[in-house]
Amino acid sequence: MDMTANLMRPGDGGAMATDPVIGEVNHPVARRVRDVLHRSTARRRTFVIDDEENIIQALRSGVRLDSVYGTADQQSRQASLAAAGLPDVPFHVLADGVVSALFGTEKRSRMFALARTPPSAGLADMIARPGDIVVLDGVRLMGNIGAVIRSACAFDAAGVVLLDGGITTIVDRRLVRASRGMVFALPVVPADARELQGCLDRAGIPLASLSARAPAPLSEAALVDRRLALLIGSEKHGASAHMEECAALHFRVPVNPAVESLNVSVAAAIALYERRARMSAPPTRKTTAATG
């Protein structure tokens, strides 16, 4: 069997020429993908980005691609990647059986890329950006975290802090996929509570908790004319008692009494929307809330 790597490259008349499909999992190109997939996440200098949409978003956020891979039916998608600014990197075509063997029981992608792990952002990077900060405390469902990151991007938040989220790096394949690649578009920082509180205190940014039991409606949070760190816990347990005690402000999203709670990603999106809408309104509509 021909084991030559499939490298898409400019052919005559601007068409893309291809070499034979990689049909063996022991081919050097396939082995490299396998090594990246099985390497400890914390030690990865290279990581996997699944799916065309996520690859394009990562490119827009400045992530450096190493190589792109796809099954034979994905070759036509090369043009859309090129239009998005795909750099001069190889595009390897893999047989379906090779892709299945590489990913095993994990999600199998018909197109994916290997990319260089970007420098990690810190809390100081987040503080330096305008906008509110989202603090997720004890939120561990990757789908929820990814949806919150996307809302944070949509409503111009400064970044997202992950407390007790079970995530040590933003290049976790599940997080990249759940955020649709948006995890690279703003600072997303795993941190501990003490580190975060010290950083917020130095920057003069009050912590504002969102809880179903809070006395004040969210509309009052929308009137605060300064940056906030919006604390949101898991839907089942809420934020930790320690973080609730650290919060200077407490708000709730008013809902029908028949609804016990809102999904964390929904609550975050509502709060960020309210905050951005009011903060961009004429100054006469704003008031300053006490944080003592």
Image (cartoon, rainbow, N blue to C red):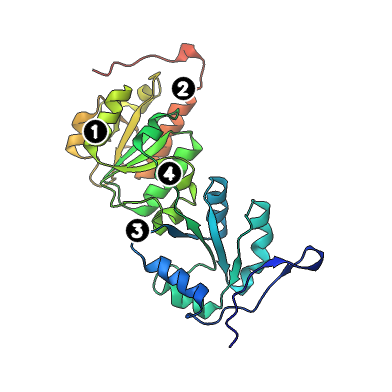
- As measured in the structure, the alpha-carbon distance from the residue carrying label 4 to the one carrying label 2 is 20 Å
Q: Where is mark 2, residue-wise?
A: 279
Q: Where is mark 4, residue-wise?
A: 149
Q: Is residue 141 above or below residue 12?
A: above
Query: Percent from the top left, x then y, of residue 182?
Result: 48, 47
- How packed mark 1 is, by other alpha carbons closer than 10 Å (few <14, some 14-19, many 20 or more), is few
- As measured in the structure, the alpha-carbon distance from the residue carrying label 1 to the one carrying label 3 is 42 Å
Q: Secondary structure at mark 4?
A: helix
Q: Along the polypeptide, which appears first: circle 4 or circle 2?
A: 4
Q: Is residue 59 left or right of residue 291?
A: right
Given the image, on which type of amino acid does mark 1 rest? Arg
Please tell me which residue lies in front, 142 or 60. 60
Residue drawn at x 49%, y 43% as measured from the top left: 185
Q: Secondary structure at mark 2?
A: helix
Q: Is residue 150 above or below residue 66?
A: above
Please tell me which residue lies in front, 240 or 192. 192
Q: Which mark is residue 213?
A: 1
Please tell me which residue lies in front, 112 or 235. 112
